[in-house]
Image (cartoon, rainbow, N blue to C red):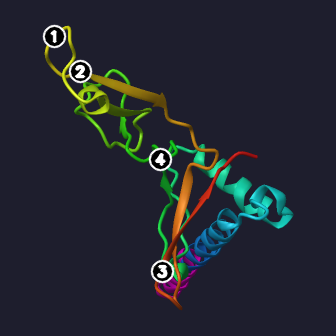
Amino acid sequence: MRKRLQLLAGIGAAFAVFATNATASEWGCEVLLCASSSAPPWQGIPSCHPPMEKLLLAMAGWSFSWPICPEAGTAAPGYEKYEPCKDGYTAIHTGDDYGSSGASDANTCVKIVDVCKSRGGMTEETGSCNQIVDHYARKVRDNPYYFDLKSTATGQTTRRYFNLNN
């Protein structure tokens, strides 16, 4: 009798783990579908509110793990706080020397302008070329999170940005 109860308890535990994983996978797929919606975004789709609100509550917990959708071949989303810099500009952190660049969280875009080339020669005062820095603050993205979705038909990857604001 004791062995039978242990077997039943083991089967029950295995079923509970399987059911939790199945639910997590289903929830992950719901989050992926809702987050990937752009016209309208998930906030405008009433059926997306429950899975996304569940996500927001879970994110507040200390042991949060992003729900994934293995069937879609995606993992946790990426995050890009800022829009890309204009062509010819490099992203840097404010206060960096102008050699530290390229980080996705760099908050300033800079471009070194060579005065000699733009004016056709050396400056009269110093006999050397001057460089000036053109810069602007990078724009913060409205939708900083993204999923990279790969088409099974074409093999092409599409990046879909979203936000978690209610």
Q: Is residue 117 above or below residue 32?
A: above
Q: Separation of disc 2 and disc 1 at Cα?
A: 9 Å
- CB atoms at circles 2 and 1 under 8 Å apart? yes
Identify the amino acid type marked 2: Asn
Query: What residue did someone put label 2 on?
Result: 130
Residue 11 among those drawn in magenta: yes
Q: Of circles 4 and 3, which is in front? A: 4
Residue 83 place in picture, x, y as percent: 52, 45
Dot 4 lies on which element? loop
Q: Is residue 96 left or right of residue 16?
A: left
Identify the amino acid type marked 3: Gln
Q: 10 Å neighbourhood of mark 4: few (<14), some, or many (≥20)?
A: some
- Give the quarter of the image for residue 55: bottom right
- Is residue 13 visible from the viewing direction of this image? yes
Q: Of circles 2 and 4, which is in front? A: 2
Residue 29 among those drawn in magenta: no
Taking depth in this image into account, of 82 and 31 the one nearest to the observer is: 82
Count the marks: how many? 4
